[in-house]
Image (cartoon, grey):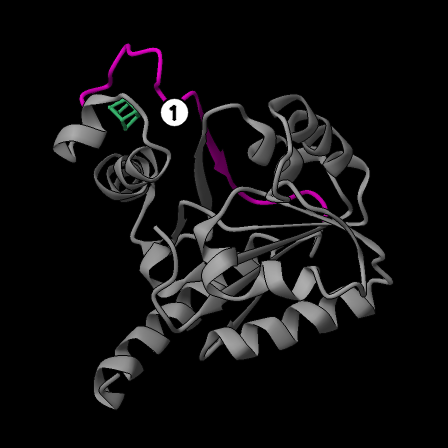
Amino acid sequence: MDRNKYEIIRLGMERTAEALRRNNYYSVCVENKEEALDLIETLLDENSVSSVAVGGSMTLFEAGVLEFLRSGKYDFYDRYMAGLTKEQIGEIHRKAFSCDAYICSTNAVTENGELYNVDGSGNRVAAMIYGPRNVIVVAGYNKIVKDIEQAQARVKSIAAPANAVRLECKTPCAATGRCVDCKSDGRICADYVVMGRQMIKDRIKVILVGEELGY
Ligand code: SF4
């Protein structure tokens, strides 16, 4: 990426990380996914983590987090393991609450230091809010928005339609690319959660990455 353009992106990331820290999140900016992976390993080691689970996330695939967690170093509750039934995946989602750490991404990070997520079944937002003692959120710079209004717009115009296409949902957004607040059976938007200032300082660790990751 052009260094001048990156500098502007970096300044926005630093501002957002500072806002997150004011809201009791631990937050660090890194330049790329390799640095993000190193930081994840450090955070897991520092917090003596042995069991880990993840939330559904393209960012984690793109950043190599899934591959890293499958290395054998951790007791990894892998919701993406081949051949799992719907019931087994549900069981892993429940076990995730008692893991040492939960790793996920987020649909949007605001410059005011908030996280905004929309879930279908709620397993991710539930684990983020009241699950493991350590939650690590990995987000590319493309997830940063000005405020909650822009976060909502981001989910409706990018994140949810793209996920609907990926999951082959029979929803209007998968066909047109636009959210119409559908009532379809395949709807993937159910729980709309704003996470503001946290009561437990540094429980949630947000890594902002200077690369475009996920949607
Ligand atoms: S509410 Fe329906 S149309 Fe809108 S993004 Fe969600 S699944 Fe798509």
**Residue 26 appears in the figure:** no
Identify which residue is drawn at 16% across, 35% down: 177
Q: Position of residue 103 (x, y in %)?
A: 63, 52
Identify which residue is drawn at 61% across, 42% down: 82
Q: Is residue 24 magenta?
A: no
Is residue 10 toward the left or the right of residue 8 in the image? right
Question: Which stretch is magenta?
Answer: 179-200
Q: Nearer the viewer, residue 133 or 97?
A: 97
Mark 1 CB lies closer than 8 A to ligand 1: yes
What residue sits right under mark 1 in the picture? Answer: 188
Q: Residue 154 appears in which quarter of the rendering?
A: top left
Identify which residue is drawn at 55% across, 26% down: 122
**Residue 96 appears in the figure:** yes
Which SS class for mark 1?
loop
> Is residue 164 positioned above or below 54 on the image?
above
Q: Is residue 197 magenta?
A: yes
